[in-house]
Every structure is written in structure tokens, then in C-alpha cells.
């Protein structure tokens, strides 16, 4: 048996497919399949090409690991470390390039004010940064970025977000938030996020041009703020953003949301909240004037106090609605449940 159960050993291209998987150029879908007969869309090709370039181009492939933090002071070369009493501290990277942040455990960093000292990893004007395989437990906000290009966030685990949001200090926290100056080429992929408390927008691509939320598992437990969302695209005028293959359990007031901006795709997502659960309002929402919004093959079961509410489209902008099930009673909690 090879890397993918749906690629038989007699497939004429199996060696090529196995090589792509071994090198990390293809990762398969959320169920671990390659789906060899499916067409390749433009957004898939962008991911394949970028991973290939990183493999063959030394300055992108050979990334520098994050050094051990000094007790105080600066790393130099535009990378600063703000010493904090909680191990390993708050990482503030400014102007950094080709850095991996991997294998750290951030614990018990609640918000003490609205100066963003509760953010675990803060990136400013950085390029080609990878944040992977970190644990965040009971923290104000795991990650925030401003003015960055080429940020990849994957396979992190979160158990508890306390806020507040970096963008709106009087609201609750996010897992990942773009903010400030324009951010480009952002990928948030295959993270497991359990909020366990009030959250604003768990993944928010505010103002970003080119961003993707792919195959993330999100459990908001329903206790969002009055405007909280599981994944929000386009907020602040962002463009060219996608949410594909995500699984959301009790994500908050809204499961998936699109506001402002241009060119968005929601595809193969599952949004589930029944009970009815506190905070549930609408599974999918589009409003406030986005343009060129596409919904394909999403499955929703979202119950609020007065019944089920799968979607609400207000303000126009939706140009494609294909293969969606807005009240899918075949969905169960098992479809969105996960272990950290």
C-alpha cells in the first residue's frame, strides 16, 4: 500500500505520485486520498508550484530554524525577542525572512490589557515564515501578522483562546489574524483549534490579498462574541481568498462568512452546530458587498433557537451556488469531532 489508498499499485503514475507526496508537494485531501481522477484547479496548481519552488530553490527550501531565545535583548537582523515570564515567551519577528517557528509550547498567556502582549507569535513585515507543530494552551491569541508575504501556518494545536483580538482590542481573540498593512500569500492549513472560550473570528484574513484556509479542524464550542465567526474571508477589503475542506463544530454566531473584497471560494466545508447551541445564528453568511463569491459542495447543519438556518446572503456578490446542502441532517457530530 502506498501513500494514498485510492492510488492502486498498478497505477502507471504511482512512482510520480509517491515522489510528490514524499517531497511534500502534494498532501492529499482531508481523508488522506489523492483523488487521481479529479481535475486540478488554479488554486491547487498555485500550491503545487510554490511547494516545488521551495524544494528546488535553496534560499526558500533551506529555511533557518528559529534559534533558542536569549534571556533578553535582540537577535539582530531585524528579529527581536521580547522576554516574558511564561516559557518560551512572546516572539516578535520584524523584517525576518526564511524562518521556521516549530515545536514550541505556549501556555497560560491570558490578556492583561489591550496592548497585544498576549499574542504568542507576532510577525511584522516578514517574508516566507513557517509556523508549524506548536502547541497553544489557554492563550490570549496564538498568531497575528501585519505587512507580511508568504506566511504558512500548519499542523499547530490550540486548546483555549481567551482574547482579545489584535485588530479590535475590546473583542475576543482569534487563532490567526492578519491585520494592519496588506498581507499576501497566506496559507493556514491542517491546524486543530479548540477555542474553549469567547472568540471573535477564529481564522480571519482581514485585508489580505491571496489567502487560504485549508482542511482545518475548528471547535469554537459556540461561545463566540456577538459577531464571532469560525472562518471569515474578505473582512477589511481582502481579495482572492479561499476556504476549502474545513470542519467546524459549534464555531460561533456564524460558521463561514464573507464580507467586502473580491473573488472568494468556499468549497467542501462542513459546518455543524445543533442543540441549539448558544451563539448559533447562521451556518454561512455573505453580506456587506463582496463580489464574485462562490459556494461549492458545502454541507451545513446549523440550529438556533427558532430552527435551522443554513445560509443568509445579503448585499449581493454571490455568483455561484452549486452542490451545497444547507440543512444536511445526515451530518452528525462525528463528522466534525477531533482529538487534539
Image: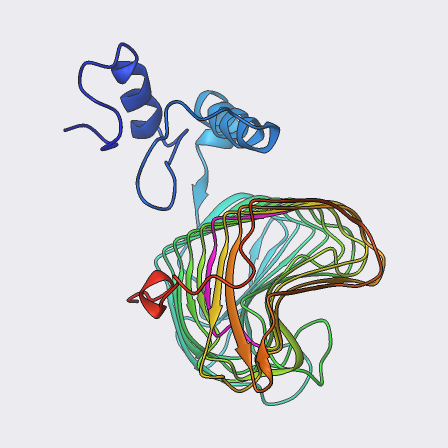
Residue shown at the point (59%, 66%) measured from the top left: 310
Residue 35 versus residue 14 in the image, above or below: below
| Quadrant that contains the C terminus | bottom left
Specify the farthest residue to the left: 1
The quarter of the rendered structure image containing the N terminus is top left
Q: Is residue 27 visible?
A: yes
Q: What residue is drawn where x is 56% and y is 50%?
A: 324
Q: Is residue 210 visible?
A: no
**Residue in the foreground of this view, choosing between 83 and 323:** 323
User: Count of labels shown?
Assistant: 0
Q: Indicate whether 185 appears above or below 177.
A: above
In the image, residue 147 lies at what x, y percent?
A: 73, 52
* Picture quadrant of residue 249: bottom left
For the point 28% across and 67% down, which residue is it? 339
Q: Tell me: 241 left or right of 131.
A: right
Residue furthest to the top: 12
**Is 249 contained in the magenta span?**
yes
Horizontal side of residue 251 vs 209, given as left or right: left
Res. 29 image quadrant: top left
Seen from the viewer's position, the closer of residues 153 and 130 is 153
Q: Residue at x 48, y 30 (%)?
A: 51
Picture coordinates of residue 23 (x, y %)?
34, 27
Percent across and percent down for residue 230 are 56, 67
Q: How is the image coloured?
A: rainbow
In the image, taking residue 238 as reference, residue 232 lies left or right, namely left
Q: Which residues are magenta?
A: 242-252
Amino acid at each position: 500500500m502506498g501513500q494514498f489508498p485510492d492510488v492502486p499499485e498498478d497505477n502507471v503514475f504511482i512512482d510520480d505520485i509517491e515522489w510528490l507526496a514524499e517531497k511534500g508537494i502534494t498532501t492529499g485531501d482531508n481523508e488522506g486520498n489523492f483523488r487521481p481522477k479529479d481535475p486540478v484547479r488554479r488554486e491547487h496548481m498555485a500550491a503545487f508550484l510554490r511547494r516545488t519552488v521551495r524544494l528546488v530553490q535553496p534560499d526558500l527550501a533551506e529555511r533557518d530554524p528559529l534559534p533558542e531565545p536569549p534571556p533578553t535583548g535582540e537577535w539582530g537582523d531585524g528579529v527581536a525577542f521580547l522576554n516574558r515570564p511564561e516559557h518560551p515567551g512572546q516572539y516578535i519577528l520584524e523584517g525576518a525572512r526564511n524562518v521556521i517557528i516549530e515545536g514550541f509550547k505556549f501556555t497560560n498567556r491570558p490578556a492583561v490589557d489591550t496592548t497585544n502582549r498576549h499574542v504568542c507569535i507576532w510577525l511584522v513585515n516578514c517574508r516566507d515564515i513557517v509556523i508549524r507543530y506548536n502547541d497553544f494552551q489557554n492563550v490570549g491569541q496564538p498568531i497575528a501578522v501585519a505587512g507580511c508575504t508568504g506566511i504558512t501556518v500548519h499542523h499547530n494545536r490550540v486548546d483555549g483562546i481567551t482574547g482579545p483580538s489584535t485588530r479590535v482590542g475590546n473583542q475576543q481573540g482569534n487563532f490567526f489574524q492578519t491585520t494592519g498593512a496588506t498581507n499576501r500569500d497566506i496559507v493556514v492549513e491542517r491546524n486543530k483549534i479548540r477555542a474553549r472560550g469567547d472568540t471573535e473570528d477564529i481564522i480571519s484574513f482581514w485585508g489580505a490579498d491571496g489567502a487560504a484556509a485549508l482542511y482545518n479542524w475548528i471547535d469554537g464550542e459556540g461561545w463566540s462574541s456577538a459577531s464571532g465567526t469560525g472562518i471569515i474571508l474578505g473582512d477589511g477589503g481582502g481579495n482572492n481568498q479561499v476556504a476549502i475542506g474545513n470542519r467546524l463544530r459549534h464555531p460561533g454566531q456564524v460558521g463561514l462568512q464573507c464580507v467586502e473584497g473580491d473573488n472568494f471560494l468556499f468549497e467542501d466545508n462542513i459546518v455543524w452546530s445543533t442543540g441549539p447551541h448558544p451563539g448559533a445564528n447562521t451556518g454561512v453568511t455573505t453580506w456587506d458587498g463582496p463580489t464574485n463569491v462562490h459556494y461549492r459542495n458545502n454541507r451545513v447543519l446549523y440550529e438556533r433557537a427558532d430552527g435551522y438556518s443554513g445560509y443568509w446572503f445579503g448585499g449581493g456578490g454571490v455568483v455561484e451556488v452549486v452542490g451545497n446542502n444547507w440543512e444536511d441532517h445526515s451530518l452528525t457530530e462525528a463528522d466534525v469531532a477531533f482529538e487534539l
